[in-house]
Image (spheres, grey):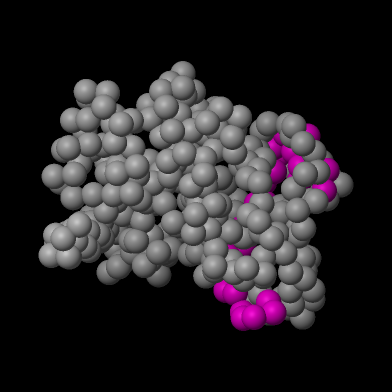
Amino acid sequence: MHPIMLLGLLIVAYFSGSQAENAFSQYWKERIGLPHPPHWLAAKASPLNPYQMALFMKLMKENKLVSHLPWFCNQANVVCSTNALMKKTTKNKTLRSVSKWNDNKLKYELPNEIPLSVASQGGLPYFRESMVKEGDFMPIPDLRDPMSYKSFLPRTLVPKIPFSLAQIEDLKKLFGVVDNSSMDEYIQNNLKLCEKSPIRGEQCTCATSAEDLIDFVIEKLGHHVRVWSTENFEGSYENVTIGAVKLVYGNLSEPPVLCHSLPFPFQVYYCHVLWKVKIYAVDLHARKKVNHAIMACHYDTSTWNPNHLVFKLLGFVPGLIEVCHWINENGVVWTKNLD
């Protein structure tokens, strides 16, 4: 390719990304009472420009996108084919492979199919509030997002994507997903999660665009919110020393919105509202650095299924104990700004 042409393409790609972040930031400013979104969330805005969106929508309408799949995936920064799964997951070579995703964490009403598989990965996926005390040691599970680099798709493009269990074969074909692959399992599990009925008192959604994410938060909390997220994945698989533990949100009558990043070809968040949840900021003193982590503690587990992994790990039944867990990389907690 001619150097001048290559330079032109790089310039277009750069400014497309900048325009996408600017458009997302503008949507944020118009609706959220904070000046800027977290940098890592703004970076997940779709890099596609209006011309590319129109072109890809045309290809989808004509059922020709599959023949342009590598180009689409590269331009949209989404995952296509099973082989792309581990791309850019982490630069830390000392950590073991990213843990097999286990959505039991989110299935509060469904029994486990693999009762103690998460526990065998290292670290505690669930724990009591009393187990997190400054100066104590604690084994931390894998905090990484299996596909942290992927972007949202544009809101105008998402309705063209087959996003349901009934259309799963069309979805897999669109993104080049192989049967019985890890990505195939991720897609099946997460579509089931997105289509499940909420437990009593829960309000939930699967946000498939940055705008949908913001709109759900505003609907539940209003425009004046605070945003909390774990700083990084340091401490994963380590027996860390617990540092300062600070209650950052303890209003049990005003529930927060918890959003979990799902492993999917494009960025999808499972967001839900559950009553009686407290949010803590906890310093995890890992080998290399301190991780400022966010911990959510649920004080009403009465509607959770007794076969849930958490009760097998902690030895209690629903409704008798509070249950805490870490907010993983790219997860986000939204709370009302009560100041």
Query: Given the current orientation, which residue lies at the most extreme right position?
Result: 315
Q: Which residue is drawn at 56% across and 27% down?
A: 179
User: Considering only vertical position in the picture, is 54 above or below 286?
Assistant: above
When the figure is inspected, residue 67 is found, relative to residue 128, above or below; the finding is above
| 139 and 187: which is toward the camera | 187
Asked which quadrant contains residue 27, the reply is bottom left
Looking at the picture, tell me which residue is in the foreground, 160 or 109. Answer: 160
- Residue 224 shows in this picture: no
Q: Is residue 273 magenta?
A: no
Tell me the quadrant of the picture where the C terminus can be found: bottom left
- Residue sitting at x 23%, y 49%: 48
Along the line of sight, which residue is nearer the eye, 80 or 211?
A: 80
Name the residue furthest front: 1
Q: In this view, does 200 lie above or below 27?
A: above
The residues colored magenta run 285-313
Image location (x, y in percent) of residue 160: 29, 29
Asked if residue 85 can be seen in this view, the reply is: yes
- Which image quarter: residue 79? top left
Q: Quadrant of the N terminus?
A: bottom left
Instruction: Estimate the x, y position of residue 223 in percent, counting from the top left.
Output: 31, 56
Q: Which residue is drawn at 37% across and 26% down?
A: 162
Residue 288 drawn in magenta: yes
Total marks placed: 0
Left or right, 12 with reference to 141: left
Give percent across and percent down for residue 287.
Answer: 69, 79
Which residue is outermost to the top? 166
Along the horizontal axis of the image, is 332 left or right of 118?
left
Looking at the picture, how far across and down is residue 319, in whole percent?
75, 43
